[in-house]
Image (cartoon, rainbow, N blue to C red):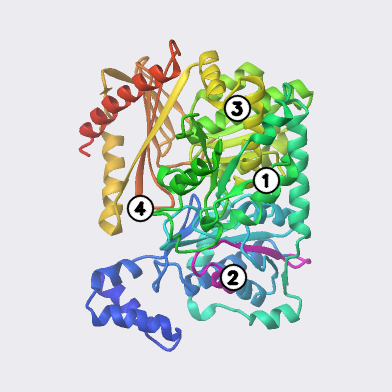
Amino acid sequence: MDRDAVLDIAREWMGDGFDRETRNEIRVLFDEKKFDELYDRFRKSLEFGTGGMRGLMGAGTNRMNRYTVGLATQGLANYLNKNKCGTEKCSAVIAYDSRNNSKEFARETACVLAGNGIKVYIFPELRPTPLLSYAVRYFKASVGVVITASHNPKEYNGYKVYGSDGCQVVPPEDKMIVDEVGRVSINQIKKVEYERAKADGMIVEISRDVEDAYIRDVVKLASRIKSGFPGTPEKTDIDKLKIVYTPLHGTGITMVPRAVSEAMGIELLCEKVQSIPDGNFPTTVSPNPEEHQALERAIEYAASEGADFVLATDPDCDRLAIAVGDGNGGFKQLTGNQIGCLFAEMLLDCYKTGGSLPENPMIVSTIVSTELISDIVKNYGVGVDFVLTGFKYIGEKIRRYESEGKNFLFGFEESYGYLADTFVRDKDGVIGSVLSVLMIQYALAKYGSIFKMLEEMYRKYEIYKEYQKSFVFEGEEGEKKIRDTMEALRNNPPSEISGGKVVLIKDYKLQKEKDLKNGTDADIKGLPVSNVLQFYTDNGIKISARPSGTEPKIKFYFQIKQPLTGSLEENEKKLDEKFEKASDDFFRLIGF
């Protein structure tokens, strides 16, 4: 669409069909001649990516606002009424996080769904995303919606859709919903007034019964794991453990302390200021627990309290980070891959020891997460599947396993997402927090510390270390830069990286795998098409490249491995040096 046509659409948003605030926001941009900003706001409509619809908040078709939320919801309602609702009426569950406008967007969603004859169950206050997944199954609802932008900066919000199994929608259903959204115009949105829909029974505010049921299932999971513990440290040692928790101004404060208390009998020390929900996230630059700075305040509090560990969840409480005290007043943040592998090692050992390992057990991870998990599951005789980035694909595997006679045990992705058991079908920071406390006790009992457990795990298998570098390219030019980078890599792949020959290339967009060592090609089977490239070298380096599905970024993942000889610290230093050389070489080759 050309620039003038886009600006004509923008002018329509100053008309009578829009509220005063929206009209004024667009009018000011025209008055100030901010045409580039207007073009970016209206050049396209928000779409569903790996995490659903997500974008900057503000007026415009390419922004999160009450109208784009209404359009998305009307399209979802049309899809449900055409494909899901038969003799019985459809129903939906809605949750929202602490972000600015989340409650308003959630109510807008409820009013549109109710206006289309779809009964709505809505949490009256902010609650974690995994509780939404649980509630969809609890109510046997047709669909779930959560308003959140997860770990994105404060300017963002988002809209995630879940199927009746509590899993985020996956192809082809997500595309079908997008197609329906694309057919809707703003004047076609049907909605009712919130309080009237409540009085008519079309909108029902959810009671604490759902939370209580969820907590009971979390406690059962913890009990199952503890039944296979190798022995417990002295009770006095457990009582001395101090664990600081920060919800980063998000929803975790509503569920994590209670879950850890009831499942583990431990009271978390909650960082007071960050325990206050606030969509401006005033005490951190970014509410992303992947970034060390997000944990700085909690670490300072932990040091002042003489605490041993720090737990952090993101605003919608589906991601979890852990920082471990080093005994000298400092803290080291574990990577998402390390946490996932430590959880897997603990779970498999405890299930095997406790006699609760089921037949055909499976663990699921993603193609950009550590391949150390393959070594771990092989040691226990457990299967593993790797899926595309996005936890919805792990949820999809759970559904498939149920019809294949397989049993899902655990899933994780490198970006701090974890799930054990199947009563939730998305990554879960509440379950992750309980698993963390279990792992702390397990490591103390069997190894003496988490660091010793990590070292022994690397010594048993190999030491794997992963790194990530991301580059932000915003706007239309940024999108072109990302597309061009991926196509350049696809058409002119590197033949050598840091002294190692590229021996294998996987292209998930073309669904092809090239074995350069043997000169053979093979099809990639069992995974949807995705714009991801992977390069493997003969000196133990793996590099993955992919555009983000939720942010204007291109991401590069590096994995380097070697046998562990000597101390863990010495090996990590060597791998860091290899990474610096490999990343410098790779980015020079691609012109970054």
- Distance between the Cα atoms at labels 1 and 2? 36 Å
- Range drawn in magenta: 86-109
Q: Amino acid at mark 2?
A: Thr
Please, what secondary structure does the residue beneath circle 2 have? helix
Judged left or right of residue 145, residue 592 is: left
C-alpha distance separating marks 3 and 4: 31 Å
Which residue position holds label 1? 267
Identify residue type, mark 1. Answer: Glu
Q: Position of residue 202 (x, y in %)?
A: 73, 75
Q: Nearer the viewer, mark 1 or mark 4?
A: 1
Residue 41, image x, y percentages: 34, 69
Mark 1, residues whose alpha carbon is within 10 Å: few (<14), some, or many (≥20)? Answer: some
Mark positioned earlier in the residue sequence (3 or 2): 2
Residue plotted at (60% across, 74% down): 112
Identify the residue under disc 4.
Answer: 552
Identify the residue under disc 2. Answer: 109
- The span from disc 2 to disc 4 (Cα, nearest Å) is 26 Å
Instruction: Give how far apart the Cα atoms at labels 1 and 4 are.
Output: 39 Å
Magenta-drawn stretch contains 163: no
Foreground residue among 287 and 75: 287
102 to 545, vertically: above or below: below
Residue 386 in view (yes/no):
no
Of the residues under marks 1 and 2, which one precedes in the sequence? 2
Q: Which residue is mark 3?
A: 384
In percent of width and height, residue 438 lies at 67, 34
Q: Are marks 3 and 2 in contact (CB under 8 Å)?
A: no
How many numbered discs, if any? 4
Q: Which of the two marks, 3 or 1, is nearer to us in this view?
A: 1
Dot 3 and dot 1 residues touching (CB under 8 Å): no
- Report helix, strand or loop for mark 3: strand
Q: Is residue 18 left or right of residue 424?
A: left
